[in-house]
Image (cartoon, helix red, strand yellow):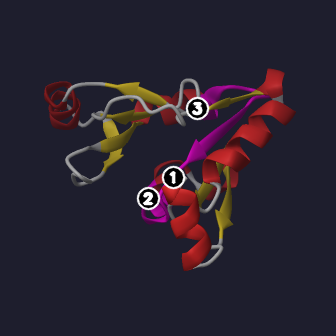
Amino acid sequence: MILTISGVSGSGKTTLAEIILATYLTDSSILESVTTREPRERDLQDEFLYITEAEFSRKEAHDDFLWTTKPIHGTRYGTLKESVDFALESTNHLYVMIIAPAYLQDLFLYRGSNVIKSIYIYSPGPENIAKRLRE
């Protein structure tokens, strides 16, 4: 099963994912996304496959992605179809996926909503978001 966590930047998606992964340590893992940016200290272990823009473009041309983003501050993000397929073919394992709400429909249409559960974290308000992002 895939459990998606979505919400605005700074809403606590990564923190919630960390709690879920720590709680179900032996039976859960993060579903890897792909990015062209450099690793950040806050990234979860195995959260991203870090690749070059050229590699990203090559995978995009081969239709390897379920979806990709337009550049965000010069950085591209995407999720590989093979990662989703692998997660859904695994038995007795929970895959946690941090995802932008805009891409949930693509995921549901690709494999059906019966094997995907979703959590949306509502915004804690502009002041709290700004504080979290500064920190």
Q: Tell me whether circle 2 and circle 1 mark residues in contact (CB < 8 Å).
A: yes
Q: How many marks?
A: 3
| Mark sitting earlier along the chain (1/3) | 3
Give, as a single range, the part of the protein colored magenta.
Answer: 87-106
At label 1, the amino acid type is: Ile
Q: Give the percent coordinates (x, y) of residue 37.
A: 30, 35
Q: Is residue 64 visible?
A: yes
**Label 2, label 1: how many angstroms apart (C-alpha)?**
7 Å
Q: Which mark is residue 103?
A: 2
Question: Which amino acid type is shown beneath numbered disc 2?
Answer: Tyr
**Residue 102 within the segment the image draws in magenta:** yes
Residue at 16% from the left image edge and 34% from the top image edge: 57
Q: Could you tell me which secondary element the residue under label 3 belongs to?
A: loop
Identify the amino acid type marked 3.
Answer: Leu
Q: Is residue 67 above or below residue 56?
A: below
Q: From this viewpoint, which residue is outermost toward the right?
A: 23
Residue 114 pos. (x, y %): 68, 54
Q: Which mark is residue 44?
A: 3
| Residue count near mark 1 (Cα–Cα under 10 Å), binned few <14, some 14–19, many ≥20 | many
- 49 or 4: nearer the eye? 49
How far across and how far down the image is residue 10, in percent? 55, 60
Instruction: Point out which mark residue 99 bears.
Output: 1
Q: Quadrant of residue 5?
A: bottom right
Camera-near label (2 vs 3) is 3
- Kindly identify the residue that appears in the image at 15 percent across and 35 percent down: 61
Mark 2 touches mark 3? (CB < 8 Å): no
Question: Does dot 1 land on a helix, a strand or a loop?
Answer: loop
Point 23% across, 54% down: residue = 70
Q: Earlier in the sequence, mark 2 or mark 3?
A: 3
